[in-house]
Amino acid sequence: MTNQHINGPAAGTPSSSLLPAKAQSGNIWRLSIAQALAGANSVVVYATGAIVGDMLAPAPVLATLPISIFVVGMAACILPVGAITRRHGRRAAFLSGTGAGVLAGLLATLAVVLGWFWLFCLATFFGGSYAAVVLSFRFAAADGVEPARRARALSLVMAGGVAAGVVGPQLVTWTMDLWPPHMFAATFLVQAMVALASAFILWGVNLPMPTAQEIAGGRPLPQIARQPRFVAAAISGAVSYMLMNFLMTAAPLAMHLCGHSQASSNLGLQWHVISMYAPSFFTGSLIARFGAGRMAAVGLALIGLSAAIGLGGIDVAHFWATLVLLGLGWNFGFLGASALVLECHRPEEKARVQSLNDFIVFGLMAIGSFASGGLLSAYGWSTVLGVSFIPLALAAVALALAMRRSAASGLER
């Protein structure tokens, strides 16, 4: 796919809305740092959510419910975040999100100290709300940027997650026993402090305020959503993220049940998060060269390979290899799908279309998260892995049909 077609008329940016080069670079750096800090929020929840849930839940089947509630918080807040963005600008949405992140850490600390499972679930809901705002960082990086640089800007901001992959698990390891006998209480308190630091970074982001056309919203959403390219983008992004969450939610508890140490689980999660974000330094260039659809397809294939390796055994090495390949697959699949979304809307439609895409992605991800805990508890880790191939097949078919239609229209090489 050529750059011309990656960023065709529907995704064009009027020259009057372009930011100066210095402002573009400043935004990308600030968003990348905020991505790194905010990523620790998600890593802490995924590393500890099922373990704390197992400690506090009234029944074992509810152990992964806090992580599922985290995903529900993401899905529930995607559209409100889009509405805030459309009316008040990106920065207002960012600061609202960091406020939710601080509240999440404080409530989780209180829940662990008091031993209240449902308060912990409320805390993870606010953590999901924060994560919903963080998701918009990747699209914010493309605001005010010329079309040819959008995919690279998007991927560079996502690269900030590399630091989260190191900081998040180590934060858990360093703090989980600092407040005896309340394991992880200090971890969540530090999580709140990190979210507060992120707010100061985001205060300096300089992005265009919404125009009258953006507030009006452009074409009806059903018309936009019927585009084959948007359908492929939404399904590919949804499956990539759903399966990443589906397997990552279950993996720490599965390792625990298989007798592996918490340190081994934290290290596996660390390399998983690094593999999710490290390729972002060059994913944008690969998308520009080979096309968003092809990169999304590679991501889906890598996720399938990760599940296949996981089925090969329950040694630490199998878990680690599964998590690393899962992270790589998510990066290519999700960023490829996100770049496809940029091709589907006009500038005045971006907030609504991007919010709709993320709502679909994280609505389906919530379903997968709820299913993951139940499947692991009832049928085991192998069943969780095996079920993953069903949505992968559906996504591959949808993407292939969209790419074939694009090729017939002359939009693919």
Image: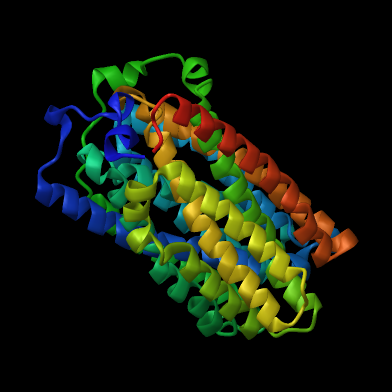
Picture quarter with the C terminus: top left
Residue 302 figure quarter: bottom right
Q: In this view, does 221 lie to the left or right of 147?
A: right
Q: Colour scheme in the image?
A: rainbow
Q: 77 above or below 392?
A: above
Foreground residue, 117 or 65?
Answer: 65
Q: Quick check: 142 left or right of 52? A: left
Position in image of residue 13 (x %, y %): 22, 30
Residue 193 or 359: which is nearer the viewer?
359
Q: How many marks?
A: 0
Q: Quadrant of the N terminus?
A: top left
In the image, is 112 to the left or to the right of 97? right
Where residue 145 sits in the image (x, y, percent)? 21, 41
The reply, left or right, for residue 257 in relation to residue 398 is right
Q: Is residue 320 visible?
A: yes
Give the quadrant of residue 18: top left
Residue at 48% of width from left, 57% of height from top?
331
Quadrant of the image occupied by residue 118? bottom right
Q: Where is residue 249 in the image (x, y as percent from the top left)?
A: 67, 61
> What residue do we see at 41% from left, 35% from top?
412
Residue 400 picture location, percent across and down: 57, 37
- Residue at 51 percent across and 27 percent down: it is 405
State whether residue 126 is above or below residue 281.
above
Q: Is residue 52 visible?
A: no
Is 274 situated above or below 90? below
Residue located at (43% from left, 24% from top):
409
